[in-house]
Image (cartoon, helix red, strand yellow):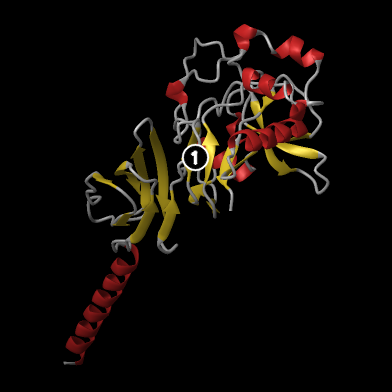
Amino acid sequence: MRLRIDRVWLTLTAVFLFTTLWLLFARTPDKVALTAHLPDDTHWTLARVATLTHPATDEEPEFPERTGSGSPIQVDLLPGHYLITVEHSDHTDTVPVLILPDHGDVTIEILDPPGGFSPVPAGASIDGVRGPVRSLDHGFGAARHEVTRTEYAAFLATPAGAGHGNAKWLELESHPERGSWPVSRVNHADAVAYAAWRTELDGGGQWTFRLPTTLEWDKMARGTDGRTYPWGDRDRRDPLADRTVLRPVDTWRELRSPYGLLHMESNVAEWTADAADPAGVRRIIRGRSTSVAAGALRAVVASPATLRSPDVGFRLVVEPVR
């Protein structure tokens, strides 16, 4: 009789342990509530790119593409990578969103920045392949291309541009047939002054133009999934293309980042807002120039703020005036 009781007890204990382990490791992850505020008069599509976790014993649950109009988007989602496509009357924005488990509900605002800029909302992103999760607490607009030589020359022709270019710069940079090339041979102060000029010219009291921070730049280049290249994890560049020469800033559209940004991995490296020391004597440069080997997307270079190099230019971001 005692032997039978012991067997029953062992059986019940085994069932309890198995059930506990299954609930811990194989349960369906809790859904997260996403609220996304969109610009007026837009049409949106929400698609899932990949889930982060799902039960090992079940197939990945289906997620039919969802569409709608107006704001906000309100939906419960499994943890994973999602893509929101926002259609305006004259252009379309693509916005990747990362939903993490155990991080609470997610509320983002997808901005409608000035022309030539793409919205990058607040929220989590993976910093590099299998890197840490970083989170931005604000949204902004990112320039789809680097500042061009023509755009910078217009700045030099104004009183605000005094001291930020000289005859040597004009000789080397301002060839008419190269006006759509990225500007270079500008130091950090030159880039900051240009951004201030753009704020006065185009901000309208609603937008501030500035250089991106390093964290913003990384999210602009990679999106939210920590990809190796702006366009994904495989090198899709044409091996026969000469990447040692500069290109017009609107070329190689097939290699754009998740937010539609061009040349985040080519043309010129780019100044950021971040200082490498307390005095700001050295500043952080991100990206790869034509003279640097491929794979420099992850590179973080500290250079003298006074550097004017043919390999370094910049692009801007915008944020609403708070």
The type of residue carrying mark 1 is Pro
Percent x, y for residue 90? 37, 30
Report whether 49 appears left or right of 9. right
Report whether 25 appears left or right of 319. left
For residue 50, above or below residue 145: below
Pick the front one: 155 or 83: 155
Q: Quadrant of residue 16?
A: bottom left
Count of marks, rendered view: 1
Pick the front one: 1 or 44: 44
Percent x, y for residue 151? 63, 22
Q: In this orientation, does residue 259 appear?
A: yes
Percent x, y for residue 22? 29, 66
Q: Which of the image's four quarters has the N terminus?
A: bottom left
Q: Secondary structure at mark 1?
A: loop
In the displayed image of the protein, which residue is found farthest to the bottom? 1
Mark 1 surroundings within 10 Å by alpha-carbon count, few (fewer than 14), some (14 through 19), many (20 or more): many
